[in-house]
Amino acid sequence: MSRKRLFQISRRDMPLVATFIVFLLLYAFGGFSYRNFMTPRVFLNLLTDNAVLGITAVGMTFVIISGGIDLSVGAVISTTAMIVAVLTKAGMNNVFVITIALLFGTTLGFLMGGMIQYFKTPPFIVTLAGMFFARGLGYVLSLGSVPITHPFYTNASSIGIRIGNGKLSMPAMALLAMILIGWFISRRTRFGRNVFAVGGNEQSAILMGLPVTQTKIAVYTFSGFCSAVAGFIYTFYTLSGYGLAAMGLEMEAIASAVIGGTLMTGGYGTILGTLLGTLIQGLIKSIIAFNGQFSVFWIKLFTGGMLLGFILLQKIFVYGTKSRRKKR
Amino acid sequence: MKGRQIPRIAWPLFALGLILLFNLMFTDSFFAITIKDGHLFGSLIDILRRSAPTLIMAVAMTYVIATGGIDISVGSVLAISGSIASLVVWGGNTQYLTSAGSQYYAPMLSIILIPLVASILLGAFNGVMVSFIGLQPFIATLILMTAGRGLAQLLTGGKVLNFRHAGFEFVGRGYLFGLPFPFLLALGVIVLGTAITRLTPMGLYIQAVGGNRSASNFSGVNTRLVLLFVYIFSGFAAGLSGLVMTSDITGADAGFMGLYMELDAILAVVIGGTPMEGGKYNVGGTVIGVLIIQTLTTTILTKGIPTEYTLLVKAIVVVVVLIIQSNKMREVMGKRQGKMMVKGGSAI
């Protein structure tokens, strides 16, 4: 038993290795094609520019591992930024503003988790309603863009640690911190193990006496918290709140997790893979920006193609090991 | 036991009835239908016209979800179809796009057929990914959703392609027998879907695949062809929907056309009582689901409520419908869980 499990784990880490190799190849391709691509600045900017996506994707990974999905994340990001903008404009205390902003996403996640678990309604539809609610709240707060002029936010975007010719910015630090927290929770806590168990087979998890209800609600709460943090970080870039911001980010976050090797059926996934999935999407954007000849529309095509490549790779890899197929 | 069952369609009907009742009491002349310019005119007719693109999409989505799948690429397929249609109207030449408003008479048949064929091919791509390669439907269609949006934008070069074309404009704006033509197209798709699923064993196969794919495979159902069919049908419907929309707004905005429409379609299907696990479907429920969403939107508009509240109201209505539909609620109300009888074949 134990030998078999050990064998599976080593084999199961293969998608992560494959993702890492593709990341390196893409990075090397950029480095050989364009001067200054392999400088610390470009790499650190990669972290900064993808911090919002990466932080969101950490929460999304947990949700997907548990066998669910969270479509509300993009809307929560934009509404969190909107709350920060509106409350700051009203002259409220920063600590109070941040608390309210973080509480909004977390509470929404908690309520969605509760509804999914208590009423047994599909996560897809419940989080879609959550998306409507969050976007709707954002529009109600303001239809236009609300600027943030408070010095706390304008100064925060210039804070950072200099490394070479680059700067490890606040968003990048937040991303690394959230990845570390996510990794710790998924690999080193009882809750993390429960998430995997619930996603692997919910019925078995119930029979094993695991706290399935609490785990599932906690997963959506955590995802809501992650998107709220991402939304807060988002204000550092844009220095404004805008109801239409972060449109479609939920699908990018799902793509990050899937490229990183997380299975949509639940039960398997890694936070490190999700970070790599996020950075690969960022690399595609950087390379196209460096190239300058391709239009931005190629980003979506390349990301789609990359997604297809990864899935087929995974498929080939899984083919021959296990034929257990689960229905979504 | 059978006598106590409440058909699942009762709940969405109840919700639609409530919204209509609200309008009967509080909105003046909501139910008034007059004849204007030779066709019917009124809020109800407007609801039918505006709901057509989502309705076309949602009917096909019902079959996809009945197989236990999902198709989130339809919004992008819609954008591709609309972009191609605009390009064909322009004779494939986007060079003179600045002179919006000039007439170009591309043959009607090519404007309709080329986008539809492209959409069917995209649907087939999804179908092959799901059935032959064995990808999960969400992922397979996520690929096309992402790449398709980029493709549509590449096709139009990121521009909004406006055009004038008297013949093509009829598809989205015309009236036939006094009724909006898009709605008649939606009816046509419903009839087509119903004919295929009820006159052939396809309906039974779809439920079988959704219920248990490997079991139906062993019992001789060609599950791959069934899956291929539902995704092709979904692609076709998305393409048709794109034609209606492009024709209605006489232009294609590849970046925003049909954005999030897949979610509305899926929402309508689920509100209509088709479970996401598959195995059962209820096209009538889907129609009501779409009508609920559109009636709600129209109500908000006619009541003069600021549009920014639309999404909030929508969220609340969705949550309420989900709760009254849930098994928990049935338990609380002391009703036994009614098994939905599917029209096509209740044998499974």
Image: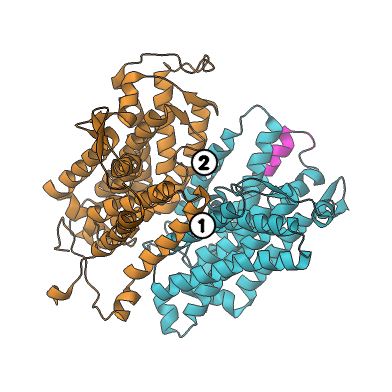
Residue at the limit of the structure toward the front, as seen here:
B28
The chain under label 1 reads A
Which mark is on residue A131?
1
Residue visible at 33% across and 62% down in the picture:
B277
Q: Nearer the viewer, mark 1 or mark 2?
A: 1
Q: Which residue is mark 2?
A: A305
Image quarter (top left, top right, bottom left or bottom right) of the N terminus of chain B? bottom left
Task: Identify the element where label 1 is drawn.
Answer: helix
Crowding at dot 2, Cα within 10 Å, few <14 / some 14-19 / many 20+, comes out as some
Which mark is on residue A146?
none
Residue A294 vs B126, above or below: the answer is above
Task: Identify the element where label 2 is drawn.
Answer: helix
Q: Nearer the viewer, residue B207 or B75?
A: B75
- The question of residue B125 being in magenta is answered with no
Question: In the image, what residue type sits under mark 1?
Answer: Met
Q: Nearer the viewer, residue B176 or B78?
A: B176
Main secondary structure of the magenta stretch: helix
Left or right of B292 on screen, residue A175: right
